[in-house]
Image: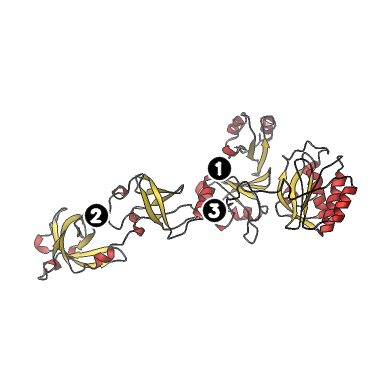
Amino acid sequence: MAWSCPLEEPIEAAYLQAFAAFAEETGVDQLAIREPQIGGFAHFGLEPPVADHGLADLFPAGLTGFHDGALVPVAAGLELVRAMLRDNGAWCRLEVEEAFSVHVGWDQYLYIGSNLPCEAALARTRSLGLFPERLDASPYEFAPEDPLRIQRPADADFWARLHWTVSAYRATFLEETYAANASRWHRLTRDNIEAVRSHLTPRAQLAVWPELLTDVDAAMASLSEEGLVEVVWEDGDGRINSTVADETQFEAVRTQISGARAVGVVSLATDERQPLFTAVLPDSDGVLRARWQTEPTPSDRDWAFLKTLRRGQVVTGTVTTIASFGVTFVDIGGFTAMINIPELSWRPINHPSDVVGVGQEITAQVLDVDMVRERVPLSLRAVQEDPWPQVAQQIGQVVTGPVTKIVPFGVFVRIEGREDGFEGLVHTSELDESTGGVVEVGDALTVKIIDVDLARRRIALSQTQARTPRHQGNRHS
């Protein structure tokens, strides 16, 4: 059950005493911070502003101690409720899972939830001059923006991709948001990723960015358009700093960054804010308990799709592009997979267009799901019958076919009467000396199939053995 307690008069002490009464009757001695937020929660309030968002001296580690999942005693919870009543104060939900919760709404009502009736606390609340109202649930209860979306966790796949990204981009930045409107920036190198990782705030939101910093003059010039931005800069000691500002504060920011080595400007508009990929830190047991969701990037959406695939799965897609270097790209549900030439057909081909065309719908098998590079190689031939066992059954047969290629160690002869027919090698030691060794491409040779190597997909032929008396079963391609 839940109660809301509107103020008849702006008496902060009454709210805090009511909270303490409910906590005592419920048996609560500590609470977990959920969805922490610093600033931006305006009540146009009845109480004066508070220094340091009301968090001063509450967390020994500073503001980063105010994070999702952090446990605080009831005394600290009371101070956090005091902060929530101020326009510039921090905000959060305080909870004991399935037992107790408290937070302040936009309407400046106090919302308390308990798994017990708490009749004594209700009586105490009324005696304080407050008017509790029973509710089924707080109208400000947490609800995910998209209940169906799977949030990407900062798991082993995430860190492997981050290592790969740092190697690919050389300079990469990690934005660590430990509370709404509060973040730290880290410049990542191959050598410091694990050190940065070990000091991240629990349950933080992470965003990976390419190189942000440019020369100071270029950044200064960009601070001229309207809008809320985050300015990131590297100071003379190599430290990464950031501040949020709008056009009314740009002049002060220009002064602040005047001695910087390099500066970057990131828009805070959702449609303009484009990191490479994002994640949320799970707890030490690997479970993702933070309830907030990052704004998904294209890479995050690819990750979510790749999680639905498995090796050996058969998928249907549409050919979108045939690259000049021979790779065929296929759209499989909004993700672009690829097929290398050897996986297009069991038979020899000169170009992918011999088998597929742009716009063609195909069915293929997933060969692998690479979560690090976010690649999915497909095989078209894997869903086709393998003709090689039938070729192996032809060992000992004599056939006639055209020479397709001449190499220093022999000649290749097509042994089937079709353009994509299989070819075998006649080694120089197996060429008939009566021809004088003069063979040209296009010449018809009668050869015997003497071996088929199924493992390496190779066919060995002999012209000399084809001239033996045993010509029964001869055929011509």
Question: x and y percent of residue 244 in the render?
Answer: 67, 37
Can residue 192 be seen from the camera position used here?
no
- Looking at the rendered structure, the kind of residue marked 1 is Glu
Q: What separation in Å lies between label 2 and label 3 (alpha carbons)?
A: 43 Å
The one nearer the camera, 114 or 162, is: 114
Measured in 3D between alpha carbons, the distance from the residue under mark 3 to the one under mark 1, in whole angstroms, is 15 Å
Give x and y (percent) for residue 154: 59, 54
- Which residue does the numbered mark 3 point to in the structure image? 163
Which secondary structure, mark 2?
loop
Under mark 2, the amino acid is Asp
Report x, y in % for residue 415.
Answer: 19, 60
From the viewer's perspective, tell me whether residue 80 is left or right of residue 229: right
Could you tell whether 184 is left or right of 128 in the image? left
Q: Dot 2, crowdedness within 10 Å: few (<14), some or many (≥20)?
A: some
| Between discs 2 and 3, the one toward the N terminus | 3
* Residue 443 in sight in this render: yes
Precedes in sequence: disc 2 or disc 1: 1
For this rendering, which residue is in front, 475 or 62? 475
Identify the mark nearer the N-term, 3 or 1: 3
**Left or right of 271: which side holds 360?**
left
Residue that badge 1 annotates: 211
Name the residue tied to disc 2: 420
Q: Amino acid at mark 3?
A: His
